[in-house]
Every structure is written in C-alpha cells, then in structure tokens.
Amino acid sequence: MLRNPEIKKFMIIQLLVCLVFVLISSLMNAVAGWMVLIVTIILNALFFGFTFLRYRKIKELVMYINRISNGEFRLDVRDNKEGELSILKNEIYKVTEKLTEYNQRLQQEKLYLSQSLADISHQLKTPLTSMIIMCEILNDPDLPQDKRKEFVSQIIVQLERIDWLVSTMLKMSRLDAGVVTMKKMDIYVSDLVEKAKSALIAPMESKEIELVTQFASEDKLKCDFNWTCEAVINILKNCIEHTPQKGRIEIDYSDNPLYHELTIKDNGAGISKKDLPHIFTRFYRGENASAESTGIGLAMAKSIINAQHGNLIVESQKNKGCKFMIRLYKTVV
C-alpha cells in the first residue's frame, strides 16, 4: 500500500491538513484542540484500516491472476457481495471459466488430432505395405503373366481404397470445420435412392443382394441431395458388407408433422451390444467388421445428417440385422 505514490501524497496532504486544524483549534481552546486531535487520529486510523483491507484484496486478485497465468485455472474466487472489487472478482471468474473451457477444448482437439493422425497412418500403412511387396514381386522377370495381372489388379484395388479414404477424410474435415453449406431443397426419395443404389451395383450383384424399396414415386423430403446421397451410400455400403450372400436390404420412407424418415434395414449379422454405442465413432471397427472396413463410413454419414440438423439412429441385435433411421426435421428450433 505504502509503495503507491498516490497514497503517499494523500497521506502527506491529509497529515498537513489535520495538523493545521489541530493547531487552529488549540489556539481557540486547548480542550477543543485535544478533541480534534483524537477525532483526527480515529478517522485516519479507520481510513487507513479500510484502505489496507482494500489493498489486501487487490493483492489477492493479483496473486490469483498470476496463478491463472501459470495454468491454475480451477480457482473459484466468486464473491456475491456488493462492491467494485466483488464485481471485479466475478468478472475475473467468468474470464477464468472461459479460459478453462477454451483450454480443455484445445486439449481435446489436440488429442483428437493425434489419434486421427495415428488412425489415418495405420489405415494407409496396410495398403501401402501390400503394394510395396506386390511391386517387388512384379520386378521378377520370371513371374507368370496370370500372376502379374492378378497383382496389378490388387494394386489398383489398394489404390482405389487409399483414394476413397483420403477423399472421405477431406470431406469429413470440411464438415468438422463447418465450411460446408447444405443446400436444402425438395427432392424425390426415389431419385435419392436410385443414385445411391447406382454407386453400389457391383458389390450388390456380386453378393446377389435383393434391394426392396417401400415408398411412393411422389414421396419427397427436404435435404441437400448430394451430401444426403453420400450418407445413404455409406449406410448401404455398411449393410452390404454385413449382409450374407443372397441377403435382403429394405429401404422405407415415412413422413409425419415433425420429420421425414428414411429407414435402411438389412438381415445381416447385426451389431453386438458392446459395439452399438461406438458404431458412429471414427475408425472404430466392431467384432464383425470386414477386412476392407476402415471404420469411417458411418461416422461420415452421421456428420452429414447432423450438419442438416437431422439425426441418424441405429437399432440392432446380434444375428438379427441392423436398422438405420435417417430423420430430417422439418422445423429447426
């Protein structure tokens, strides 16, 4: 407190004024002089006492801010009393809470980034290693022509897998960054399903899967056509992977005052109770995951539907198939 030059000046001026009043009152009356001196001492003592307490609180605030700068965010200095210092304490607490939240979010993003990089590198490492081995074998001049063609075909498959993985990750990063603008419009359900189906004709035919649709030709829903089609393709791809030979996939559409609902159901192996809570987690591969599965298709579908203020719900039991419900709400509150 005494290190403050303003306080020093005030004390000197106050002392001089008090001495002047004491001298004047003493000249008029000795008793009055003593009375003024006593009152002056009491008032000054009270003033300096309150000033000392105020500066002690300010010192506590300074120490608190220093602790914040050292990373100690979890310090509660909330003060519900009235006064300027109490208001200042509350404001500091609010800023501290915001800093804590921001710091936690940064830590989570850092952890997520490191995990994502590890997952991506793992996903790329397998096909790259496989291609390196096949390329070394292809260097053998004595390799039979049929084997050579087989290895070239396998390399093309692995390259297509890498291309799909990188493309999907770029799309997901755009969705995460919030730079994708969803262009919602009324579209026919039949057009959406037909486009999604056309992208998966080859795997469906190879497994002889029957696709059954249950909706009218005039049924419509409001969504971004291309992005929603991407979500449907990823869901159908997952259903195809887990549906047995000559299996069945059903696509149904329903409508109510709250939302449009597109249901995709298969009669495959289903999802175990243990895997169900993690089905939309990126790079998560359940116990029934195929060797080609990367674990990001359903996560991307979820991100696309969420970006349109919708919801993607899954219901499943092991060995009883899987049911995905895309709900696109008509009104966003």
Image: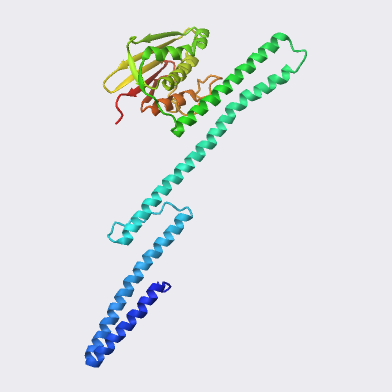
Tell whether 257 sits left or right of 156.
left
Residue at x 27% of width, y 60% of height? 82
Residue nearest the observer in this picture, 183 or 229:
183
Q: Relative to 83, does residue 158 appear above or below in the rendering?
A: above
Residue at x 35% of width, y 21% of height? 185
Position of the N terminus by quadrant: bottom left
Q: Residue 201: where, in percent of width, then height?
A: 49, 10
Is residue 283 visible to the viewer in this orientation of the structure?
no
Q: Residue 28: where, in percent of width, then height?
A: 22, 92
Q: Quadrant of residue 186?
A: top left
State the residue lying farthest toward the right.
142
Residue at x 45% of width, y 53% of height? 72
Tell whether 233 sits left or right of 214.
right
Residue nearest the observer in this picture, 239 or 167:
167
Residue at x 76% of width, y 16% of height? 140
Numbered label tally: 0
Q: Quadrant of residue 316?
A: top left
Q: Relative to 52, does residue 276 appear above or below in the rendering?
A: above
Q: Residue 92: where, in percent of width, then height?
A: 38, 55
Q: Relative to 299, does residue 33 appear above or below in the rendering?
A: below
